[in-house]
Image: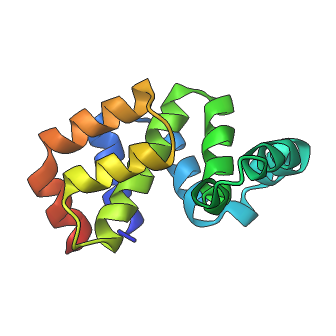
Amino acid sequence: MPKWEIHDKWAEKMGLSEEIADFVNHLSDFPDKTLEFMEFCEREGKTIILRLVRTHDFERIMKIPKYLQLMFARQKGSEYVTAWYLHYVLDYIRMAPELTTEEILKRTEARFERCQELERIKRFVMENVEELVRDCRA
């Protein structure tokens, strides 16, 4: 995963607040230490997980931990969802150097959902692809 300094740099370039970026960094990397998220999981996790399991779709079932984070971010607001997708994509770029950025964005959309926040991330990433990839894969 890129260092948080890289996440912070790109969140700032996107115009996301430092508070939201910090919150999402902790949520993404230490979900079990994010009290508000843990309370959300206790309150709503079972319903969300059961809905995914009923699909009998292994790929959907495997995304439960990250999907719970995304649903939690969605309840907090659009900027949190944007920050969450940015963090996720930056991590993916770092972890999958064999994939192009376009493929990473396609796979992210296929794994989660098409939404305005992800569309914003896709545009931003492609506008800054060279510097962003250099930062994430350094």
Q: Nearer the viewer, residue 9 or 77?
A: 77
Can you give x and y, in whole percent of width and height, for residue 40 in the image? Answer: 81, 44
- Extreme residue in the left direction: 130
Question: As displayed, is residue 102 above or below residue 44?
Answer: below
Question: Which quarter of the rendered picture does the N terminus lie within?
Answer: bottom left
Can you give x and y, in whole percent of width and height, for residue 14 in the image? Answer: 30, 36
Question: As displayed, is residue 114 above or below residue 28?
Answer: above
Q: Is residue 13 visible?
A: yes
Q: Quadrant of residue 70?
A: top right
Question: Which quarter of the rendered picture does the C terminus lie within?
Answer: bottom left
Can you give x and y, in whole percent of width and height, for residue 27 in the image? Answer: 62, 55
Q: Is residue 15 visible?
A: no
Question: As displayed, is residue 105 above or below residue 16?
Answer: below
Residue located 23% across and 44% down the image:
125
Question: As displayed, is residue 138 above or below residue 19?
Answer: below
Which color scheme did the rendering employ for the protein?
Answer: rainbow
Indicate left or right for 17 with 38 as reference. left
- Extreme residue in the front direction: 56
Residue located 37% across and 63% down the image:
92
Indicate left or right for 59 with 123 as reference. right
Indicate left or right for 29 with 55 as reference. left
Q: Quadrant of residue 97?
A: bottom left
Can you give x and y, in whole percent of width and height, for residue 7 in the image? Answer: 37, 56
Residue located 42% across and 30% down the image:
117
Q: Quadrant of residue 73?
A: top right
Residue located 49% across and 45% down the image:
84
